[in-house]
């Protein structure tokens, strides 16, 4: 759900529109939960939920986050458990083979972008060190600055993925030849 939400928000869709899109494709237990468990008032409260921006006290739509929170709360009980589990999964996530990189990137990004510390240098370092060992060293050599240090603070995940993709394709082409 968060991946669909992020993709729609990139295209400037409002939170309420995204939530309605997600709700429209509910099937099975999710559909039954919404139709039979939630009252009309609860459904409307989710769709009308807002947050107040602490900086300028402006209202911000919070529909998708509220929808996901309510689903999590109903089916898992304690949403903090999910956050702890995600942190554990993120710590143990590895890409053992280069052919699994796309899966690794998608799984890592899905989990890391749900965290407030997503942009911290140690998360970016973890993304790189989760790759196969020899490949990790090759990538680090490509991103080292003049002082011999990897500038994780200034690197974006897009920079890292681009740095990984080029040598990764070269290695794959070398293996095929």
Image (tube, rainbow, N blue to C red):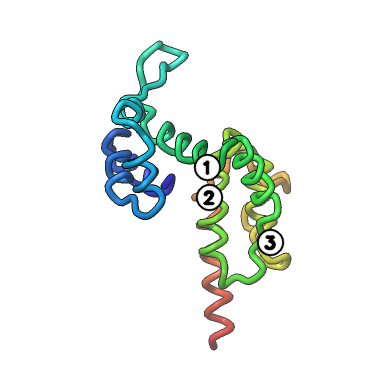
Total tally of numbered discs in the picture: 3
Residue that appears at 71% across and 46% down: 149
Mark 3 packing: few (<14 Cα in 10 Å), some, or many (20+)?
Answer: some
Lateral position of residue 129 relative to residue 100, left or right:
right
Quarter residue 61 falls in: top left
Q: Residues within 10 Å of mark 2 (few under 14, many from 20)?
A: some
Q: Which mark is residue 113?
A: 1
The label shown at residue 109 is 2
Q: Residue at x 38, y 38 (%)?
A: 37
Q: Is residue 97 above or below residue 107?
A: below
Mark before the other along the chain sequence, 2 or 3: 2
Distance between the Cα atoms at labels 1 and 2?
6 Å
Which residue is under mark 3? 136
- Residue at 52% over, 72% down: 169
Mark 1 vs mark 3, CA separation in Å: 22 Å
Q: Residue at x 39, y 43 (%)?
A: 33
Residue 38 is situated, as x and y percent measured from the top left of the image, at 36, 35
Relative placement, left or right, of 89 versus 26 is right
Check contact, mark 1 vs mark 2: CB within 8 A.
yes
SS label for mark 2: helix
Secondary structure at badge 1 equals: loop
Report how far apart the C-alphas of labels 2 and 3 lie in the structure. 18 Å
Q: Position of residue 56 (x, y in %)?
A: 41, 11
- Of residues 36 and 22, the one nearer the viewer is 36
Where in the figure is residue 69, as x and y percent of width and height?
48, 35
Q: For residue 104, what is the image quadrant?
A: bottom right
């Amino acid at each position: 759900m968060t991946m669909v939400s992020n993709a729609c928000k990139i295209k400037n869709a409002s939170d309420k529109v995204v939530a309605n899109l997600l709700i429209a494709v509910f099937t099975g237990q999710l559909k039954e939960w919404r139709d039979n468990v939630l009252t009309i008032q609860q459904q409307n409260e989710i769709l009308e939920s807002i947050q107040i921006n602490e900086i300028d006290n402006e209202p911000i739509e919070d529909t998708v986050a509220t929808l996901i929170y309510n689903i999590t709360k109903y089916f898992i009980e304690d949403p903090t458990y999910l956050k702890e589990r995600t942190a554990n999964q993120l710590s143990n996530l590895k890409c053992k083979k280069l052919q699994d990189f796309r899966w690794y990137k998608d799984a890592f990004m899905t989990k890391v972008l749900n965290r407030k510390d997503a942009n911290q240098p140690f998360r970016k370092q973890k993304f790189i060190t989760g790759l196969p060992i020899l490949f990790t060293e090759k990538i680090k050599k490509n991103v080292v600055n003049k002082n011999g240090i990897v500038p994780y603070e200034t690197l974006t995940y897009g920079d890292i993925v681009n740095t990984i993709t080029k040598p990764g394709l070269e290695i794959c082409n070398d293996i095929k030849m």
